[in-house]
Amino acid sequence: MDLDALRLFVDLAETGSFSKTAGKHFVSQSAVSQRVRALEKELGHRLVERGKGRPGAHFTEAGERTLAYAREILGRAESMRRELADLGSEIGGALNVATVYSIGLHALTPAVTTFLRQYPQVNLHLEYLRTDRVYEALQAGAIDCGIVACPKERPGITVQLLPVENMVVALRPDHPLAVQETIPATALHGLAFVAFAPDIPTRDLIDSYLEGHGVTVRITQAFDNIETIKRVVEIGLGVSILPEPTVEREVHDGTLVTRPLEGSALTRPTGVLLPKGRTPTRALERFLAVLTPNPSSP
């Protein structure tokens, strides 16, 4: 089977356009159509519906099934290439990782520093994306792994869990609740609240917690960037619930204080997203080992 044709087919699914796929591969649009037709002839099924008054590429049921296999085949081919390239060589090469800001700028920093110190020959590229874009980048084969909060397995993606993060109430030092050692969820009822954007998984986690305690907050602002949330809390436009590691600097500088939630703790799961069926490179294996070290023996 022609791997180049499969790559065109997968990219056609990603772009939804014959012309965009052609531009990405520096070939003509007719060349893309011919390769797809050749693939259809080989498999004996129509994979893409053309025309019918609808712009773009629309996959048939056979096309959707072929797409899943195509991604797996390309992933295995890439794994073979990387594994053979690694034989007899030092730990090096490129390692592409995508993560969300709230993890990458805080909890991930010590691990990245340790990894680069141990394996200086690895060209680590760390990219910050929204959660949905991390999943998409991994499914498209653009990254080696993704690191997100509240991870979920999806088709073609498996999850390796990382340590959970404690969630705490973040507020200005002069806020009336700052005098309390712990804050019950009910104390937040009706307060001005700075939230994560609705499509951020951490928002769902916090909303479920508050709803479970019968608490309704007054959301004044919502952002997809945790740094912006902290700045808005600092100027007094509301309180927030944030992962504890993300607020350590502000607590040290005295611009914010944090208080644990009273009673049952709220934690945020984190994890590494990995492509199913793809053998990790040695660089990725070492990176995962740094992220999830074995506990020290007593």
Image (cartoon, rainbow, N blue to C red):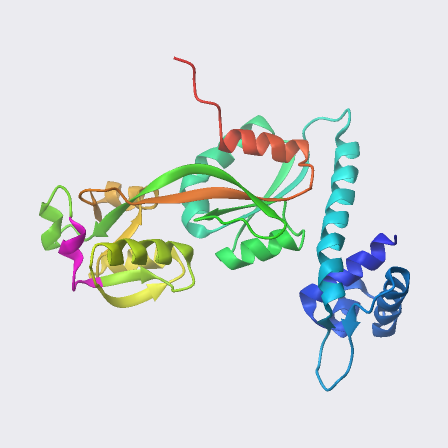
Name the residue nearer the viewer: 142 or 297.
Answer: 297
For this view, does 121 lie left or right of residue 167?
right
Q: Quadrant of the C terminus?
A: top left
Instruction: Tell me: residue 32, above or below residue 99.
Output: below
Magenta stretch encompasses residue 185: yes
Kindly identify the residue that appears in the image at 70 percent across and 83 percent down. Answer: 54
| Residues shaded magenta | 184-192
For this view, does 119 lie left or right of residue 99?
right
For this view, does 116 lie left or right of residue 56?
left
Q: Position of residue 202 (x, y in %)?
A: 38, 54
Q: Position of residue 250 (x, y in %)?
A: 27, 46
For this view, does 94 lie left or right of residue 19?
left
Q: Position of residue 135 (x, y in %)?
A: 56, 54
Kindly identify the residue that appears in the image at 41 percent across and 49 percent down. Answer: 102
Instruction: Tell me: residue 277, above or below residue 137.
Output: above
Q: How many marks?
A: 0
Q: Position of residue 58 (x, y in %)?
A: 71, 73
Name the residue nearer the viewer: 211 or 114.
Answer: 211
Kindly identify the residue that appears in the image at 49 percent across and 56 percent down. Answer: 131
Instruction: Tell me: residue 32, above or below residue 142.
Output: below
Report the residue that reaches farthest toward the bottom.
53
Instruction: Tell me: residue 170, above or below residue 221.
Output: above
Kindly identify the residue that appears in the image at 48 percent across and 23 percent down. Answer: 294
